[in-house]
Image (tube, grey):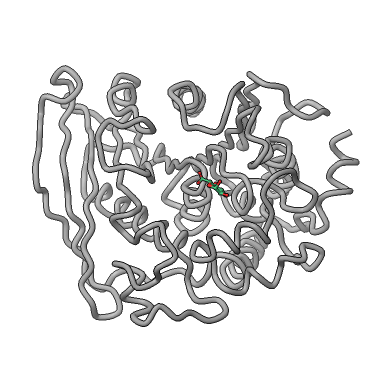
Amino acid sequence: MIKELLEERVFQPIKDFAPEEWDAVRKEYIDILCREEYGIPLPAPTKLEFEVKGANGRFAAATATHKTIVAHTEIYGTEFSFPFTSVIPNKPGKYPFFVHIDFEPGVPNKYYPAEEIINNGFAAFHFDFNDVTIDKNDMTDKLSGILFPDGERQGSDSGKIIMWAWAAMRIMDYAMTLDCLDFDNAAVIGHSRLGKTALVTGMLDTRFKYVISNDSGCSGASITRDKKGEHIEFITKTFPYWFCKNYTNYIDESKLTFDQHMLLATIAPRTLIVGSAELDEWADPDAEYLSCCAASKAWENLGLTGFVHPDRLPTPESVFADGNICYQIRHDGHYLSRRDWNVYFNIIKDKMMKNR
Ligand code: GCU
């Protein structure tokens, strides 16, 4: 059944390649996704310093320290600073960790269960995406204003998703200055528009060994063609600033020469985790699942297990986590819930046990 659905929906299957050809194929996918959809990635900063602004060692019943840190960067000859936070267990160790691309600044907040993250044996970093550039159609704001002082963009000039991804990579730069982290188990996670951003971050930065997309939907994890809910026409009219201008060339989706399973494939050979919600028709759980099915070939061509799934569409409360692509779907609506986080904790802990 899945084979037939993929034949109907995926017009650009992952190509055959030998393992030694993967770097070149991966680069080809990244180039097309950047040129036609997200825009050109920003360069690494020419200067980068971190300033710890505050530390509270009594976080989560005094088991962890919460810090506020400011990244001072220089990009295109201009200084740009943004804040982020860390929560790290006080007990010495090497902790697996999350970089959470978030909607809000507070720790914890409704999308960010910092205490549960600590209790599950992880460290975590988070930032509010609006501190990098505001989630509005104003290209002159903060980081975006450095690139586009008059707000004007052309063709494949960067959109804001790729700018938020740049910020997540700077937090990984900071993480790498610490010796209490387990870099084999570093995850990037985001929900919805920030799930799209987490996938783009994972595409650009292989230091993230787990890439977690929660309900990212259209222009995130979902196959675009024939999906339910949101399509390129709506998303590029409502949120043009998330993408590059070229993406509007695909409002007629029959013109697509790429699709979102290629974005998922760029995560190979690392671990991709895709989460859906039953009632989230706008994102379309089936389209997220089919995209995982289509991306699987990238891992298989590398001699790895891709997506292990039944030969049918998913039903709520399923977790398919035997391969390097993991998929979960829960009941209820569009949200990054405590339940989602718990599934992600368990998947990563399980993989860590198996890799020991
Ligand atoms: C809108 C948008 C989606 C996006 C979502 C969100 O619904 O159309 O593409 O994922 O916002 O970020 O919450």
Expressed as whole percent of the image width and height from the top left, the position of residue 216 reads 56, 44
Expressed as whole percent of the image width and height from the top left, the position of residue 161 reads 47, 59
Examine the rendering and report whether any part of residue 356 can be seen: no
Query: Which picture quadrant has residue 278?
Result: top right
Q: How many marks?
A: 0
Q: Quadrant where the C terminus lies?
A: top left
Residue at the spot 36% in from the left edge and 53% down from the top edge: 168
User: Which one is in front, 141 or 292?
Assistant: 141
Q: Quadrant where the N terminus lies?
A: top right
User: Which one is in front, 341 or 177?
Assistant: 341
| In this picture, residue 122 sits left or right of residue 341 | left
- In this rendering, the answer to whether 286 lies above or below 146 is above
Query: Which picture quadrant has residue 232?
Result: bottom right
- In this rendering, the answer to whether 287 lies above or below 28 is above
User: Which one is in front, 145 or 59?
Assistant: 145
Residue at the spot 35% in from the left edge and 20% down from the top edge: 120
Examine the rendering and report whether any part of residue 182 can be seen: yes
- In this rendering, the answer to whether 28 lies above or below 6 is below
Expressed as whole percent of the image width and height from the top left, the position of residue 235 reads 60, 57
Query: Which picture quadrant has residue 44?
Result: bottom left
| In this picture, residue 161 sits left or right of residue 173 | right
| In this picture, residue 204 sits left or right of residue 280 | left
Expressed as whole percent of the image width and height from the top left, the position of residue 56 reads 10, 32
Residue at the spot 61% in from the left edge and 29% down from the top edge: 277
Residue at the spot 35% in from the left edge and 52% down from the top edge: 129
